[in-house]
Structure formats: C-alpha cells, structure tokens
Amino acid sequence: MGHMDTLRRLDAVAKRLILMRGLRSVGQGAMVVDLTLYLKDLHWSAIAIGGVTSAAGLVGAALILLVGVLSDRLGRRPFLLIYEALTMLSAILASLTPKALVLIFAIVIAGFGRGQSGGAGPFSPAEQAWLARHVPQRDRGAVFSVNNAIAFTGMALGALIGGVPSLLHGLTPVADYRPVFLMVGGFSFLCMVILLQTPESPYPVRSQPESSTDQQVDREWLGQESSPTGTGFAEQMGRHPDLPSKSAQEREILRRENRAMLKLALVNTLNGLAVGLTGPMMAYWFSIRYGVSTGAIGVTLAVGFLVTGFFSLLSGVLAKRVGMVRSVTWMRVVGSLFMLALPWMPTFSLAAVLYVFRNAINRGTQGNRSALGASLTRDKRRGLATSINALSMRLPSSIGPTLTGYMFDAGWLALPLLLTASLQLVNAGIYQWVFGAMDHAQDVHNPVDQRLG
C-alpha cells in the first residue's frame, strides 16, 4: 500500500516517464537475450563481441557526461527524443541487413544488448534528473524502486519474446531475428509519441508541497540555516538558476555536493568493472557452457527479471526499515556469494535457478542506488550528478566485455564470474564504509546527509 499511495501522489509527467521506461524495457530485455547469440550465429568471435560491447561502453561514457551537463541547460526532453529516434533507426536497419557497420551502430550508439534496465542508455541522466524533479525527496527511494520494478517486469516480457528466433527456421539469421528488432523499433516509436505529449517545465517543481521535515533536512545537509520564508533551499535556488552566487554559503554547498559526487563515483568504479565482466555476456556464457537455445536462455532471463522486480520492491521496503545504504550492502553481499557458486553448477537447470536469484538480489538494489545518486545535489546540478554517477559505472564497465571475450576464447569460462563476485564483495564493503553514516535513526530513507561533506 505504501508504494501505491506514493505512486498515486505523482503528477502526470512522472507517471509518463515511468510508463516510457516500462515500454522501453521490453525491447531491451529481448536484446539482452538475442544480441550476442545473433552475433554468434553470424560467426562473430567472443573477442569481437566483447570488443564492440566495450566500444559501446566508451562511447556511452562520453555521451553520458555531455548529456548530463547539456540537459541541465537545455532541458531533458530533447535528449530523450534523440535517444528514441536513434534506437528506432538502429532497430529498423538491423532488421534489414546483417552488415557489421549497421550492427556496430546499433550496439555502440543505441546500446543494444547492454541490458540497461529500461533506462535511456547514455541519455539516462536526462531521464533520471527529470523524474527526480517531479518526485519529493522523501519519496524518491520508493518511487525509484517501483520504477525499477516496472522496468524489470518489462524486461522479463522482452526476454520471453527474445526466445522467438529459436522457434523460427528462416534461411538466414537476420530472418529469424527480424521480428525482435522490429518490436524494439515499435516500442521506441511509442515512447517518442508519449514524449511529444509530455511538457517539461523550465524550473524545479514539486509533485506536492514538501513537509517541514523534508525542508529542514534539505537545509541541514546543504549547510543552510532555517529560512524565514519556510521554503526549502532547492526551491529558493531554483527560482534564479542562471544567477551565480559569490557567497561563502554557496561555495560551501558546492564543495559538499562535489565531494559527495566524487565519493559515489569512486565507489561505483569497482562495481562498474564487475558488471562489465559478465552483464552483457551472460547469454553467451549459458550458450557455450551448457549448449542451450535462445528459448531456454530467454525463459531463464525472463524469470530472473520478474524476480528482480519483486526484489526491487523489497529493496524499497528494506530501505525504510534498515536504511537505504545497509539494504544495498547486504543484498549485494548475498548476490555475490551466489555468483561465486554459479560456475560450479553441473547442469543448466541448477545454474539457471542460482542465476535467477543472484541477478534479482543484486540488481534489485538499483532503485535505491539511483535515488541516492539523484539526491546528492540541487535540481540545477542534478543532470551533472546523475551523469557522474552513470559515467563512473559505464567507463570501467566498458573494459569488461573485451576481457571476458578473451577469457571465453581461451576457455576460462569460470574466471569472469569469479572476478565479478570478488569485485562486488569488495565494493559492498566500501559502499557501507563510505555511505553507512547516512542510515541515521531519524531519517533512514533520506539519501542525503551533511556527513557527506
């Protein structure tokens, strides 16, 4: 009931952004299953698949920083429209020809196969900043967790659709995979239609008035004394976002924000490398390790995404009970232990069950992690904050697929999974050490605290 009440309080813009993420996630779920297997059917080597996936990560990292900074100045909607148009174009071209240049464009520019949890790829900082603007700070943990759950439900449906090529027996791989690519393009078209009907306000807004508690927390973590007008600092600064302040107070606030962003970026680096080692290559791993079809892999990933949606909602509940940071830490520890055991499973069935729960527990924390990243700064710098958060994940993760492709070609099938588990265990400890103080007793669900400074 708590999640439903929170969603009902959202305004129309926030609801449309969540709807678009759900639609977009269907196509992304199908691509997680099919892209690497399609390239395998086209006789690409594992190192070639890993290399182009790494290139996609590097290009995406550059775009992430650019989009975050520019969207703070130019607005969020234009960048999301560009992303949907590029995705639709990539899908149409990929459905027509298997030429390498077309597929490289689809993978590098549109992010096909990366499994971005319904996010807008390298344009996701604009999307997250836009959603955060329409969600009161006290509700962000719950809303971002529900948003994450909806995305994983869509990816589950997409993963099932990703099994369609195994049912077809065309003359060429492109004929078998064409329906999936066209489906991806269709959902991007729907997202474009919704975007064109969604207005973007030029200044920070609230979906409902902030309580005095929320206003006080904003002032405390930003180092501001109580305001005689009773308004929060974000609203005051948002009225004149283009007027620079020379005050010592503004310099102190910027210092706190910058240090908070830097800490999160450093913590994310290990997790980004771990995700890159296995995330884009798991369908390929199941295929070469157990010799199973796209249908079997699609069902496995679909169940995994559905269970992940449940754990995402559970993560939001745990954040309110034990603290946002602590819930992320312990779920990641458990998920890492499951990953350590995965390479030793003797049958596909056992491996599939273990992977479903490992994936669900680990990725179910994404909503809380996104909420934390989106709440480290005021609205006028939120695009930059979400960009740095995403960049610190994307840049190290871009190295992973190339390393994994090399290890797969060398026959070292277990090593990438063991490295992923080890890195994420270390990351969980560092995450708790750096941000654990934010889970204080008076406001365990609020992701920002003056101790970040």
Image (spheres, rainbow, N blue to C red):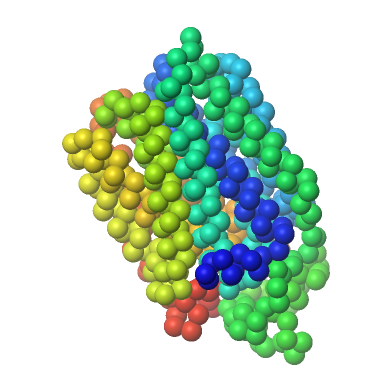
Q: Hey, which quadrant is residue 403 in on the image?
A: top left
Residue 311, placed above or below residue 409 = below
Residue 51, placed above or below residue 83 = above
Q: Position of residue 336 (x, y in %)?
A: 30, 53
Q: Position of residue 433 (x, y in %)?
A: 37, 69
- The answer to whether residue 162 is visible is yes
Q: Front-most of 92 and 398?
A: 92
Residue 394 relative to residue 225: left or right: left
- The answer to whether residue 64 is visible is no
Residue 347, placed above or below residue 255 = above
Residue occupying image coordinates x 45% and y 80% = 440
Residue occupying image coordinates x 51% and y 22% = 177
Q: Position of residue 352 (x, y in %)?
A: 30, 40
Q: Position of residue 302 (x, y in %)?
A: 42, 41
Residue occupying image coordinates x 59% and y 81% = 217
Q: Front-most of 172 and 277?
A: 172
Q: Residue furthest top?
A: 171
Residue occupying image coordinates x 48% and y 84% = 442
Residue 261 relative to residue 350: left or right: right
